Structure formats: C-alpha cells, structure tokens
C-alpha cells in the first residue's frame, strides 16, 4: 500500500484506552478522518496483538476504508506476518532505530509494504544526512512534549528528556527526502504551529484514546489540522 497518508495518524493499544474496548475508539478515529492506524502495545501478548490486527482489518473492510486508511503494527514483524497469514490486511510495520532492521522487514513484507522509522528528531537529522533510507517510507519524529505513553522517547545519553522545538522540526521537514509525522504529547492547541513547520502530519495516542469522548476529540484534531493545512 504505497498510496497512503500520514497526515492524521492514530497510535493505540489496549493499555491506552482506560479499560475501554479498543475497536470502538479506532472506529471513532477513522470516522473522524484519521488516515493511518498503528497498533502498538508493550503489554499485550503476541496472540492478543494478532487478534487486534485481525479485528481492525475487518473493521476497516466493513467501513469501506481498507484502501484509504493504512494499518501497521509497531515493532512486531512476527505479529504482522501471523495476522497476514490468517487473512488480515496489514499494510506494514513501524520500527525504531533499536528495533528489527527495516531491510529485514522489507524482505519479509514485500515491496508494497509500508515501513516507517521513528527516532528522536536530532537522530533523524543525522540519519538523513548520513544514513541509507532506501527501505523506509516515512519518518516519525518527536517528542514535542513529555508523554506518559512512551517515557523513553527522546532521552539523551544521561536519560534526560529532550523535547523538539518547532525550529528543529522545520529544519527536519526541509531536509527530509521522506514524509515526516510528529508526535509525543501532541494536543489540539499544537496543530496550527506544527502545520506551519512544513511537516506532513501528526500522530497522537492519549489525545484520542484517553479522551472522555474519543470521537469528539478526534474530530477536533482533524478539523484544526485540515484548517491549518
């Protein structure tokens, strides 16, 4: 699935929804206009993740969104392969620079798969300047703010949090040969400034999954972003 949009990107797993079922929240995000879904969990078992990918794939098919909303899993190549084997339409995988190598993902998932890479913005700038990004389809950068959903995101060698400035993101958007989506504590009030940097999209977890009304929260984010773009 090479024709995909990272503009409005929702990351979610069972630990993010406050004990509520995941699928209704995914449905609400897609109905609101989110264009990309990533299933991510550090607590769910492989079997639970496979089932969640299957259920999400089925939901997208029922909504008529299988070809317009991308579905990937975080980190777990084994889970993606197993879900595909069981008939789910899983478009690819998202990895970090300490996860499985992107070229291995590409080998097993094929040329049409989506392979995304995330890293702190400074590392991505170095990677873009020095690295081989031929097996990558998009970059994820951050964090913009401290976030409880990924506490190890943006730490320096001493374990201190480094958040990313709008100027850094503007520079990243200027030099990146691939599309960039930015997250890490992103809220509705950040979107106008983020859009002005030239980055291609934003990603959220808690702003939708942790909201009292996920659908209303997702609609607000989509409306602000679309207006700003």
Image: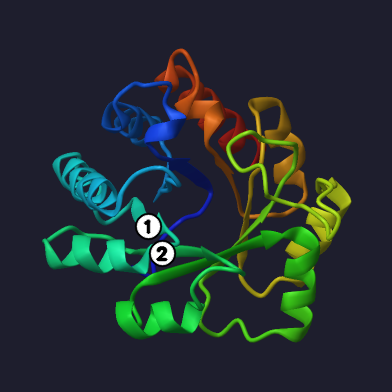
**Which of 67/159 is in front?**
159
Look at the numbered disc 1 and give the secondary structure of its residue: strand
Give x and y (percent) for residue 133: 60, 81
Residue contact at pointers 2 and 1, CB within 8 angstroms = yes
Measured in 3D between alpha carbons, the distance from the residue under mark 2 to the one under mark 1, in whole angstroms, is: 5 Å
Give x and y (percent) for residue 159: 81, 51
Q: Name the residue under label 1.
A: 72
Query: Which residue occupies 25% across, 69% down?
Result: 81
- In this rendering, the answer to whether 225 lies above or below 81 is above
Q: Mark 2 points at which residue?
A: 93
**Which of 180/149 is in front?**
149
Which image quadrant: the N terminus?
Answer: bottom left
Query: Which residue occupies 41% across, 36% down?
Result: 33
Q: Quadrant of residue 122?
A: bottom right
Q: Would you call the spot at circle 1 few (<14 residues within 10 Å), some (14-19), or many (20 or more)?
A: many
Q: Would you call the spot at circle 2 few (<14 residues within 10 Å), some (14-19), or many (20 or more)?
A: many
Query: Which residue occupies 54% across, 29% down?
Result: 206
- In this rendering, the answer to whether 43 lies above or below 131 is above
Look at the numbered disc 2 and give the secondary structure of its residue: strand
């Amino acid at each position: 699935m090479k024709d995909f949009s990272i503009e409005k990107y929702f990351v979610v797993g069972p630990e993010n929804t406050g004990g509520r079922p995941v699928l209704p929240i995914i449905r609400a995000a897609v109905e609101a206009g989110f264009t990309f879904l990533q299933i991510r969990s550090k607590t769910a078992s492989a079997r639970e993740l496979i089932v969640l990918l299957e259920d999400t794939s089925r939901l997208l098919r029922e909504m008529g969104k299988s070809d317009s909303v991308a579905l990937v899993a975080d980190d777990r190549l084994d889970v993606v392969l197993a879900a595909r084997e069981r008939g789910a339409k899983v478009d690819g995988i998202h990895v970090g620079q300490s996860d499985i190598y992107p070229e291995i993902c590409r080998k097993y998932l094929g040329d049409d798969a989506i392979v995304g890479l995330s890293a702190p913005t400074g590392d991505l700038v170095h990677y873009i300047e020095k690295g081989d990004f031929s097996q990558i389809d998009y970059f994820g950068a951050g964090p913009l703010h401290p976030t409880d959903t990924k506490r190890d995101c943006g730490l320096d060698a001493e374990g201190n949090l480094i958040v990313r400035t709008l100027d850094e993101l503007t520079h990243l958007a200027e030099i990146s040969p691939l599309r960039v989506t930015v997250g890490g504590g992103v809220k509705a009030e950040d979107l106008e400034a983020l859009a002005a940097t030239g980055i291609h999209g934003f990603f959220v977890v808690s702003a939708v999954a942790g909201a009292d009304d996920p659908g209303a929260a997702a609609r607000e984010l989509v409306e602000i972003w679309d207006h700003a773009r």
